[in-house]
């Protein structure tokens, strides 16, 4: 079960972002990977921030930086998943 705390940790927000990107790719296969992932990561982190309390310019700045960190982690995990799937199908990377 997701809690507000999941949105406010790098690991939780990365897992949520990766899951949302997997879901989004079903409907928009040609989505520009890094940019859409970054947008989804920022949205995920901002939702967590808004669930925690009011938004100030300081918290907004920290959430934007956190969203960038989550986007980098999500992009890295997506590449890892793609490489694992390629190897499991007998392909080479």
Image (cartoon, grey):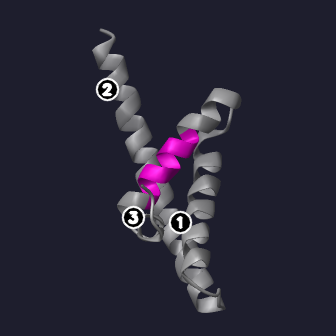
The residue at which mark 2 appears reads as: 84
Question: Which residue is located at x 63 percent, y 37 percent?
Answer: 24
Residue matched to label 3 = 10
Residues packed near mark 2 inside 10 Å, few (<14), some (14 to 19) or many (20 plus): few
* Residue 84 location (% of width, % of height): 31, 26
Residue occupying image coordinates x 59% and y 90%: 58
Looking at the image, is 68 positioned above or below residue 92? below
Q: For the point 51% across and 51% down, which residue is it?
A: 17
Q: How many dots with numbers?
A: 3
Query: Could one spot residue 12 in this view of the protein?
Result: yes
Q: Earlier along the polypeptide chain: callout 2 or callout 3?
A: 3
Where residue 2 appears, as percent x and y from the top left, is 45, 58
Determine the secondary structure under disc 2.
Answer: helix
Q: Are marks 1 and 2 in contact (CB under 8 Å)?
A: no
Q: CA distance from mark 1 to mark 2?
A: 25 Å
Residue 29: tell me if it is visible: no
Element class at badge 3: helix
Percent from the top left, x then y, of residue 20? Answer: 56, 44
N-terminal-most mark, 3 or 1: 3
Q: Dominant secondary structure of the magenta stretch?
A: helix
**Could you say which disc has been placed on residue 31 in the image?**
none
Stretch of the chain drawn in magenta: 13-21
Query: Which quadrant of the figure contains the N terminus?
Result: bottom left
According to the picture, the residue beneath numbered tag 1 turns out to be: 67
- Helix, strand or loop at label 1? It is helix
Nearest to the observer: residue 12 or residue 76 = 12
* Rendered-image quadrant of the C terminus: top left
Most extreme residue toward the top is 90
The one nearer the camera, 82 or 44, is 44
- Queried whether the magenta region covers residue 60, the answer comes back as no
Which quadrant of the structure image shows residue 5?
A: bottom left
């Amino acid at each position: 079960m997701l809690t507000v705390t999941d949105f406010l940790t790098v690991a939780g927000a990365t897992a949520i972002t990766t899951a949302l990107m997997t879901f989004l790719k079903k409907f928009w296969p040609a989505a520009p990977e890094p940019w859409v992932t970054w947008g989804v990561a920022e949205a995920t982190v901002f939702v967590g921030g808004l669930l925690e309390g009011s938004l100030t310019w300081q918290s907004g700045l920290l959430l934007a930086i956190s969203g960038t960190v989550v986007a980098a982690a999500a992009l890295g995990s997506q590449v890892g998943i793609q490489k694992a799937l390629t190897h499991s199908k007998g392909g080479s990377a």
